[in-house]
Image: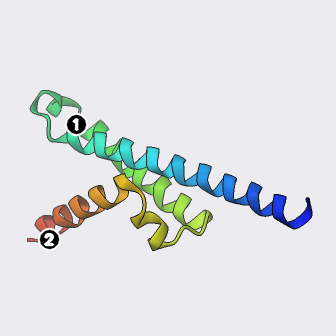
Amino acid sequence: MGQGSHRGAKTFRRRRALEFLERLYVKRATLKQQLQTPELQSIHPVLTGELKAIEMVMNEFIQLFDIHEEELKMMPMSSNTDEAQGKEDQNEEK
């Protein structure tokens, strides 16, 4: 029971952490969609603030749990939204 059960618990906790991070990616994608919605233009500053806060939490979470790029690539939401984020960042630089 010693070493094997400890590894299983550690793997379980890591999986739960990755699932939580995936939920944050979903929230970020939702906020980005809302920012593109004309009907929500009046609350654009609020949505922008929420988006920045979610991204800050995500970055801190990734650092705190030492989540590696390979693990992020395996997450369905992260790959889609990171590609979109990269395109948006390039557009903002122009």
**Counting other residues with Cα less than 10 Å from the Cα at mark 2, is it few (<14), some (14-19), or many (20 or more)?**
few
Quadrant of residue 10 in the image? bottom right
Q: Is residue 44 above or below residue 13?
A: above
Q: Is residue 66 left or right of residue 88?
A: right
Number of on-image labels: 2
Disc 2 from disc 1: Cα separation: 22 Å
Q: Residue furthest top?
A: 39
Three-letter code for the amino acid on which mark 2 is drawn? Glu
| Residue under numbered circle 2 | 93
Which residue: 60% across, 54% down? 15
Image quadrant for the N terminus?
bottom right
Q: Is residue 84 left or right of residue 14?
A: left
**Badge nearest the viewer, 2 or 1:** 1
**Left or right of residue 26, residue 36 in this image:** left
Q: Position of residue 26 (x, y in %)?
A: 37, 44
Which amino acid lies under the numbered mark 1 shown in the image of this protein? Gln
Residue 41's place in the image compared with 60, above or below, is above
Give the image location of residue 38, x and y in percent: 10, 33
Task: Give the label on residue 94, or none.
Answer: none
Residue 18: x and y, percent? 54, 54
Residue 60 in percent (x, y) is at: 53, 61
Which quarter of the rendering shows the C terminus?
Answer: bottom left
Identify the residue at the far right of this view: 2
Q: Is residue 71 above or below residue 33?
A: below
**Numbered badge on residue 34:** 1
